Image (cartoon, rainbow, N blue to C red):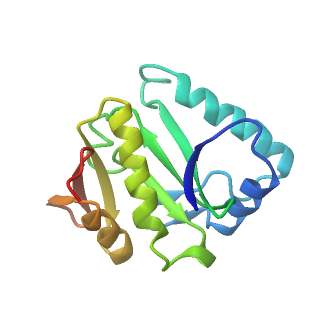
Amino acid sequence: MIELKKLSPDDGMDVYAMLQEIPKEENGLVNSGNGLSFAEYKEWLKKKCAESEQTGLVDGWKVPSTTYWLYVDGKPAGFGAVRHFLTDALRKAGGNIGYGIAPRHRGKGYGKKLLGLLLEEARRMGMDRALVTIRLDNGASKAVALANGGVVTEQTDERILVWIDTVRKI
């Protein structure tokens, strides 16, 4: 069984352990839960929960973002976040959706499923489409985005920009 669960301040050791498996920075994804002590992780959860409830920009640049865990057969296997809206800077690097799968769960189609579920959440937030920015050397993420109906609209020296309709016809 595969399900998406919204981050909660009550999340425990299973999520903490999964976050330690995913590198702190990999292919443009920043996992700010990696390397924290368990006590720091519990405070981080509170901060991330508050980020999902904010409106407008914080500190003049930070947009609201909601984090989710991908559970496979009752165990966390990955995570993703949906930014509620974009700034000009996020339209070039960052996008609406970022996601990562723990290394031991890769190659099983979970990335495709996770992105699909995150697109459903983006639709629930009122987005007609969502942007995913992908580093040029990340072929796996490009394949995931295209498999979810993504269309490459731009390429820079560092990344491709992929827009995906949240009401998918897949």
**Left or right: 103, with 36 as reference point:** left
Q: Which residue is rendered at x = 38% and y = 30% of the image?
A: 125
Q: Which residue is rendered at x = 17% and y = 59% of the image?
A: 151
Q: Is residue 38 above or below residue 105?
A: above
Quarter containing the N terminus: bottom right
Q: Position of residue 65 (x, y in %)?
A: 48, 36
Quadrant hosting residue 116: bottom left
**Can the viewer see residue 164?**
yes
Q: Which residue is rendered at x = 48% and y = 68% of the image?
A: 110
Q: Nearer the viewer, residue 90 or 115?
A: 115
Q: Is residue 126 above or below residue 29?
A: above
**Can the viewer see residue 158?**
no
Residue at the limit of the structure toward the left, as seen here: 153
Q: Position of residue 61 (x, y in %)?
A: 42, 30
**Left or right: 132, with 11 as reference point:** left
**Left or right: 110, with 74 as reference point:** left
Q: Position of residue 120 (x, y in %)?
A: 37, 44
Residue at the limit of the structure toward the front, as seen here: 1
**Left or right: 66, with 103 as reference point:** left
Q: Is residue 19 above or below residue 126?
A: below
